[in-house]
Image: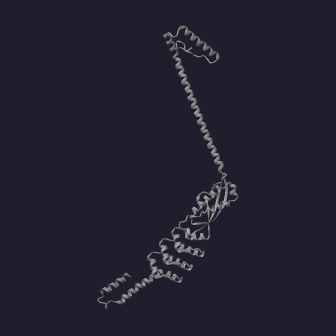
Amino acid sequence: MEDKLWMIGGILGQAQSMEEIPWGWILLGLGGLVGIFCAFFFIKFGSLWLQARASGCPISGIEFVGMFLRKLNSRLIVDVLVMAHKAGIPVTIDKLQAHVLARGNVTATIRALVAADRANIDLTFERAAAIDLAGRDVLDAVRTSVHPKVIDCPSQEAGKPTVDAVAMNGIQLRCKARVTVRTNIERLVGGATEETVIARVGEGIVSGIGQAESHKEVLANPRKISEEVLNTGLDAGTAYEIVSIDIADIDVGENIGAVLMANQAEAEKRRAQAEAEAQRARAVARAQEMEALGRENKAKVILAEAEIPKAIAAAFKSGNLGVMDYYSLRNLQADTEMRKSLSGEGDAELPNAEGEKN
């Protein structure tokens, strides 16, 4: 094609006047260019153009060229447009191209619109595209809205097989619940996911069992718990509408009340032992203190007795004590020692005038 353009340019440059210009060759070259373009178009988009036209939703060549320049998958867009047209979904090729450019799943979006139309669900292309671009599976959402799905509580990924709760009498109950939910299309964008529903249902089961006077009440009528949980509006702010909550399994666990009482008794026992040990330690400390005080007083008595010979000697020197008085004191001491010996108190050692003990 470039060679032909250079050829035409050369011919025009060599021409001296309008009469000398070979218009036939020029027209022939332009016709060749048009023919090459048409051949390229039919080779690239001919089957798609015929498919769209035969399906009743014709697409112009300019739109095919635009898709080619935007690097869009024209076959995908044509197939989706034909699907929507045959299903009676009002959608334009510009909206499909915009959704593809936004990295949306246009096939799942159109299939969701078809499923919603068959199920008489009010769902527009704009809302379906918004749900798809928000990262939600719009087709699965429509299917779940038509056919509710069952969610296990707790979920298998949680790693805990049951929901454990304790009644007011201290008996533990282990429950498994199944929650039937339906997708709420209006709250799908921005609504909470399945994890929130499972957490709220588990919380409601624990609260309901905890308010029961006895575990026997729950075992006799498990549906009462599920009805109480269902009536608390757990689906508020979520992307689902809870249809029903069923207690699939319930077992009796441990006697948590007895375990707590035993632990409390053990704690009180240890506290009493600690208090008794503290009292014994205080008593031992007091006895040792009194013993030390007695030894101190005894030492003071011994020190005082040691001053008696000095006082007697001083009395002799000053003349306040005579020899007869001294012998009378000695006789009194001897008489005292004899009485103590007879009474069994043992020999009492009293200092004499020389400061020696007998």
In the rendered structure, the answer to whether residue 323 lies left or right of residue 14 reads right
Q: Residue 213 location in percent, x, y?
A: 67, 54
Residue extending furthest toward the bottom: 19
Q: Is residue 201 above or below residue 67?
A: above
In terms of depth relative to the viewer, which is nearer, 79 or 33? 79
Image quadrant in which the C terminus is located: top right
In the rendered view, tell whether residue 99 sits above or below residue 174: below
**Residue 253 position in % (x across, y down):** 66, 53
Q: Is residue 31 above or below residue 218?
A: below
Spot occupied by residue 9 in the image (x, y as percentages of width and height)? 33, 84
Scheme of colours in the image: one colour
Whether residue 162 is visible to the viewer of this picture, yes or no, is no
Q: Residue at x 69, y 56 (%)?
A: 217
For the point 60% across and 70% down, the residue is 145
Residue drawn at point x = 57 percent, y = 10 percent = 328
Q: In the picture, which quadrant includes the N terminus?
A: bottom left
Residue placed furthest toward the front: 320
Q: Nearer the viewer, residue 40 or 106?
A: 106
Depth check: 188 or 175 in front? 188
